[in-house]
């Protein structure tokens, strides 16, 4: 079996006396996707912050690409974060920088890459999310959906192996949300990045889990996923700090558990 | 006792930030571009307000001390009073207070909104230490630019005093300026130059600390801005007292 790119082993975290995570364990294999569901405040986003090392757990171990990060000093975490791309809720774009500077931020500021190469890479990722004409705009001039796509582009620039999405479609209309879903599917199927999506938008979650992106005659199409593809995406449901369900879309749909049924209805 | 615990926690966090700033000053990476930008924003940006406050303070000092000195028939030494109070006390303190109002509030609002919109988390996720990128350039700019602004403030204050002396008090300009230099001892000049370094450091670090600990949306940003100005101003006056006491023991 392949080594997991992300591994949680008995992770617990509480803020004061509120338990957020209670002995959570799961593995994310290379090229796979996990969709984390749960009610608001169930600790979904906390999982992403723990992976990035922005928060530290009270107990348990977290591994990213084989390295233990839960007790790693901040200085060493910077190297681990180079393998991670994070799409924050609402985008979290730097509002004093242009789209180009946002997308190229890591390469401009944290590497010695020549400006011309950075610009080429920025153009490439902006092209990937279909926004290459917007490079010189400020984030405030973009629509909500465009801002999310820029955030995805920014997360992609340094070619991370793992992408983390925090509520990528929350607050968007259904049509715009679908364009974001398609970007996420493209990245999983065409670029083969491993990813974790945190969301409570069930419609988008199921859309991502049950569709795949294929190249036919040089044209990109989104079709119903083949059984082999369906296996690549797993759902993970959090309830009271524990994992209440882990499995594929079909199993989740046909679950008999009362809480899951209530959540899905 | 919860407020005491809160206060201790706050001081602890402040000191931790100072240690990180110290480390950020002497080790790489250093964000030169941001440092230049902050020197411009804090230094050049505050010039107008410092010129205005300096001039008016010098002018009012001349008016007031002229009146008092008349009682002793000593109007001609008005320059001494203006220069001594400007250089030792009013220049450093008023400049620091004006910079607190203008820059401290700006820093807290900027860092605070970056905090609540997760831009600071995004910086960290992109591999940048926000202390090095955001706090170190501001602290450097504060420590270097507040003393320079103070010198400018002192100078225009004395010029303002001179204008009032010759136009309102009928003290000849040559008399005023020789009295200005008579009033200044080398110890006073040292005091006037050392103080603003401390005050600049205090006001900027407090604003950064408050900004980086902002919680709770737009309301939180408003609160942080107020705290930075109120906390910064009180801290400037308190620091001024203690530094003055220390320098008197040391210089005179």
Image: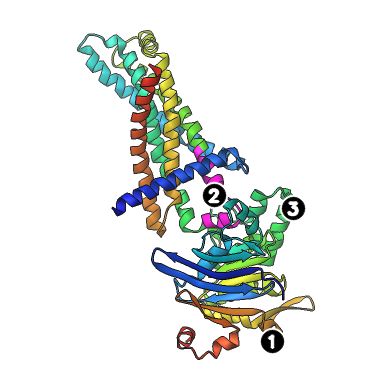
Q: Is mark 3 on a helix, strand or loop?
A: helix
Let me know if marks 1 and 3 both belong to one chain.
Answer: yes
Majority secondary structure of the magenta segment? helix
Q: In x, y percent, where is residue B223? A: 36, 52
Q: Which residue lies furthest to the left in this view?
A: B71
Q: Is mark 2 on a helix, strand or loop?
A: helix
Q: In x, y percent, where is residue A186? A: 68, 73
Using the image as rendered, state which of residue A173 and residue A196 is in the foreground: A196
The subunit letter for the residue under badge 3 reads A
Q: In x, y percent, where is residue A41? A: 44, 71
Please name the residue shown 36% across and 21% down the image.
B248
Left/right of residue A190 with respect to residue A247 in the rendered view: right
Q: Residue furthest right?
A: A217
Start-end of magenta stretch: B119-139
| Quarter of the C terminus of chain B within the rendering | top left
Q: Is mark 1 on a helix, strand or loop?
A: helix
Please name the residue shown 71% across and 47% down the image.
A112
Asked if residue A82 can be seen in this view, the reply is: yes
Tell me how far mark 1 sits from mark 3, CA to CA. Answer: 40 Å
Residue B241, compared with residue B36, is above or below; it is above
Please report contact status of discs 1 and 2: CB closer than 8 Å, yes or no: no
Q: Mark 1 points at which residue?
A: A227
Tell me how far mark 1 sits from mark 2, CA to CA. Answer: 45 Å
Residue A83 colored in magenta in the image: no
The subunit letter for the residue under badge 1 reads A
Q: Mark 3 points at which residue?
A: A117
Residue B208, located in which quarter of the rendered image? top left
Q: Residue B130's mark?
A: 2
Let me know if marks 2 and 3 both belong to one chain.
Answer: no
The subunit letter for the residue under badge 2 reads B
Residue B79, compared with residue B195, is above or below; it is above
């Amino acid at each position: 079996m392949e080594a997991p790119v992300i591994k949680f082993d008995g992770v617990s975290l509480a803020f004061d006396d509120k338990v957020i995570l209670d002995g959570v364990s799961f593995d994310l294999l290379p090229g796979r996707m996990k969709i984390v569901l749960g009610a608001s405040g169930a600790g979904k986003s906390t999982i992403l912050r723990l992976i990035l090392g922005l928060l530290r757990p009270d107990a348990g171990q977290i591994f990213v690409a084989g390295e233990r990060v839960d007790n790693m000093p901040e200085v060493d975490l910077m190297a681990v974060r180079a393998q991670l791309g994070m799409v924050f809720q609402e985008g979290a774009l730097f509002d004093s920088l242009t789209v180009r500077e946002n997308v190229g931020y890591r390469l401009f500021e944290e590497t010695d890459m020549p400006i011309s190469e950075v610009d080429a890479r920025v153009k490439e990722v902006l092209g990937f999310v279909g926004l290459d004409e917007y490079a010189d705009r400020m984030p405030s001039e973009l629509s909500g959906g465009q801002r999310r796509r820029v955030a995805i582009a920014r997360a992609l620039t340094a070619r991370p192996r793992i992408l983390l999405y925090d509520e990528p479609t929350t607050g968007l209309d259904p049509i715009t949300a679908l364009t974001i879903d398609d970007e996420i599917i493209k990245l999983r199927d065409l670029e083969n990045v491993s990813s974790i999506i945190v969301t409570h938008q069930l419609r988008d979650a199921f859309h991502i889990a049950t569709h795949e992106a294929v190249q036919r005659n040089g044209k990109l199409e989104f079709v119903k996923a083949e059984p082999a593809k369906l296996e690549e995406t797993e759902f993970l449901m959090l309830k009271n700090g524990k994992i209440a369900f882990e499995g594929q879309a079909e199993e989740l749909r046909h679950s008999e558990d009362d809480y899951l049924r209530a959540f899905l209805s | 006792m919860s407020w005491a615990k809160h206060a201790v926690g706050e001081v602890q966090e402040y000191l931790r930030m100072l240690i990180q700033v110290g480390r950020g000053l002497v080790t790489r990476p250093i964000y030169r571009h941001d440092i230049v930008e902050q020197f411009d924003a804090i230094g050049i940006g505050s010039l107008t307000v410092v010129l205005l406050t300096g001039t008016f303070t010098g002018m009012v000092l001349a008016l007031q001390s002229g009146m008092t000195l008349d009682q002793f028939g000593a109007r001609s030494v008005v320059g001494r009073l203006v220069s001594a109070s400007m250089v030792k006390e009013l220049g450093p303190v008023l400049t620091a207070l004006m910079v607190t109002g203008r820059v401290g509030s700006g820093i807290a609002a900027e860092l605070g909104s970056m905090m609540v919109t997760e831009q600071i988390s995004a910086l960290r996720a992109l591999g940048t230490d926000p202390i090095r990128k955001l706090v170190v350039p501001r602290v450097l700019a504060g420590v270097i630019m507040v003393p320079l602004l103070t010198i400018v403030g002192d100078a225009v204050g004395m010029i303002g005093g001179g204008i009032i002396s010759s136009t309102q008090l009928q003290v000849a300009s040559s008399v005023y300026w020789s009295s200005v230099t008579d009033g200044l001892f080398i110890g006073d000049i040292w005091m006037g130059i050392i103080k603003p370094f401390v005050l600049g450091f205090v006001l900027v670090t407090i604003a950064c600390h408050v900004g980086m600990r902002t919680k709770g949306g737009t309301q939180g940003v408003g609160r942080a801005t107020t705290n930075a100005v109120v906390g910064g101003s009180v801290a400037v006056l308190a620091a001024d007292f203690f530094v003055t006491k220390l320098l008197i023991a040391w210089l005179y």
